[in-house]
Amino acid sequence: MIEQVYDAASEADCRALIEACGHHVELRRERFADTSGARIVDRLTAACIDRANVAFRRALRAETVLLARLGPGGRHPRHADNCRQRACGKWEPNHTPQRVVSAIHYLNGDFEGGEIVFEQHDLVIKPLRGLLLLFPSDQHHVHEVRPVCAGHRYTLAIWMVKHEPALSNPVGR
């Protein structure tokens, strides 16, 4: 299942994150934490998790959140987010096998190229400002990002894992 949610982020939030990315992309989260950009990221991440919990009927939490910018020539080759395909064609866990759901908030659409392609689903998605894309991180949702031809493509990517609450009262104590 690939879910597209239009207007999941407001124009103002998208503009603020693009501005923050332009000035703070190289800064660590701790130095970014007290800004309005960080509050927007936290709010959009929470809303994304709520939407994913319903869509995928799972309890999820954010594992990694990444504010990213791709310029001309930038692309992501064909891949799955939690596994890799060996030369023989067999799929095996990659360095992030715990990822269950992937999400992308598109922060702008004023660039050329940069479409995300899900070949197995015969689906090409042109990024639009405010669009949230949710999909399983597995080998059934292999995707690529075509090269950006002009402008910059800004995204807020969120990878989610199963939420496993800690035991508050272990048995036998």
Image: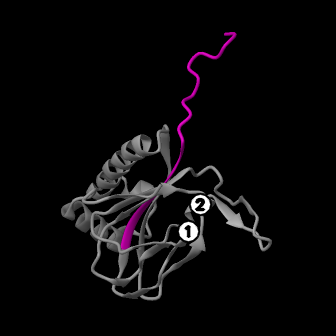
In the displayed structure, 103 sits above or below 153; it is: above
Q: On the picture, is 96 further left or further right than 34?
A: right
Percent position of residue 57, x then y:
47, 39
Secondary element under disc 1, as helix, strand or loop, is: helix
Which numbered disc flags the more N-terminal residue, 2 or 1? 1
Residue that extends furthest to the top in the rendered view of this protein: 173
Q: Residue furthest front?
A: 122
Residue shown at 31%/63% (left/top)?
131
How packed mark 2 is, by other alpha carbons closer than 10 Å (few <14, some 14-19, many 20 or more), is: few
Q: Is residue 61 magenta?
A: no
Residue to which mark 2 is pinned = 140
Q: What range is drawn magenta here?
A: 154-173
- Residue 93's disc number: none
Q: How many marks?
A: 2
Q: Is 172 above or below relative to 132?
A: above
Q: Is residue 155 magenta?
A: yes
Query: What amino acid type is highlighted by mark number 1?
Result: Gln
Residue 142 located left or right of residue 150:
right
Q: Amino acid at mark 2?
A: His
Q: Nearer the viewer, residue 28 or 83?
A: 83
The residue that label 1 is drawn on is 120
The image shows residue 144 at horizontal and vertical percentages of 52, 74
Residue positioned 34% across, 72% down in the render: 127
Q: Position of residue 85 (x, y in %)?
A: 71, 68
Report x, y in % for residue 34. 32, 52
Report helix, strand or loop for mark 2: helix
Q: Pointer 2 and pointer 1: residues touching (CB < 8 Å)? A: yes
Q: Quadrant of the image for the C terminus? A: top right
Q: Is 5 positioned to the left or the right of 86 in the image?
A: left
